[in-house]
Amino acid sequence: MAEEHTAGLNAGGSQELIIRDDILNKARELAQVLGSSEEVQQFQQAEEKINNHQRIQQLIATIKKKQKEIVAFESLKNKSMVDRIEAEIAALQAEIDGIPLVTAYQQSQKEINDLLQLVMSTIRDSVSEKIHVESGSGSASSSCSD
């Protein structure tokens, strides 16, 4: 058994690279599968529609302009103008949020985030199970503290 371990160490550098490359290739495959999922397709379609929606783009540009105005008025320490412009931005943002296309975009974005969180937690849990079982770190580690 010790000879097998030593043989593994001698070839360990290349073995580690093969395993790492395999993991990275599987991650790329997973990314490709996720990229072609229904959730991502819906998100991309909504994003394209938003990018081509004249009123939404106009509102976004106005908000960006007003944000720059806030920075200027903050440097002049003009709190009343900052407050007024922040209120204008809030009204513009409310208008954007009221557009059904934006709601659909935000929903598709949430679905993608949920899917990614599910994938990440599944990987984390699967790796944790393997490490726990294979390392024998269950009750053995608690008995060492006696």
Image (spheres, grey):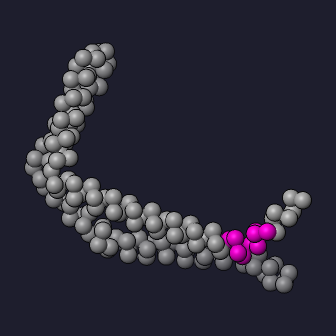
Q: Position of residue 44 (x, y in %)?
A: 25, 64
Image quarter hosting the N terminus: bottom right
Q: Is residue 69 in sight in this rendering?
A: no
Look at the image and tell me whether residue 59 can be seen: yes
Closer to the camera, 27 or 40? 40
Residue at image position (81%, 65%) is 141
Q: Is residue 36 left or right of residue 6?
A: left
What secondary structure do most residues of the magenta stretch adopt?
helix
Q: Is residue 114 left or right of residue 3?
A: left
The location of residue 64, given as percent across then percent down, is 22, 36
User: What residue do we see at 79% from left, 68% from top?
Assistant: 139
Q: How many marks?
A: 0
Vertical relation: 66 (above or below) 116: above
In the rendered image, residue 125, in percent from the top left (x then y), is placed at 57, 68
Residue at (81, 63) in percent of width and height? 142
Q: Quadrant of residue 50?
A: bottom left
Magenta span covers which residues?
Answer: 131-139
Is 135 within the magenta? yes
The reply, left or right, for residue 74 in relation to residue 17 is left
Q: Image point 74% across, 72% down: which residue? A: 135
Q: Position of residue 2 (x, y in %)?
A: 85, 81
Q: Residue furthest top?
A: 77
**In front: 46, or 137?**
137
Indicate whether 79 appears above or below 115. Answer: above
Q: Is residue 88 above or below residue 98?
A: above
Magenta run includes residue 66: no
- 47 left or right of 23? left
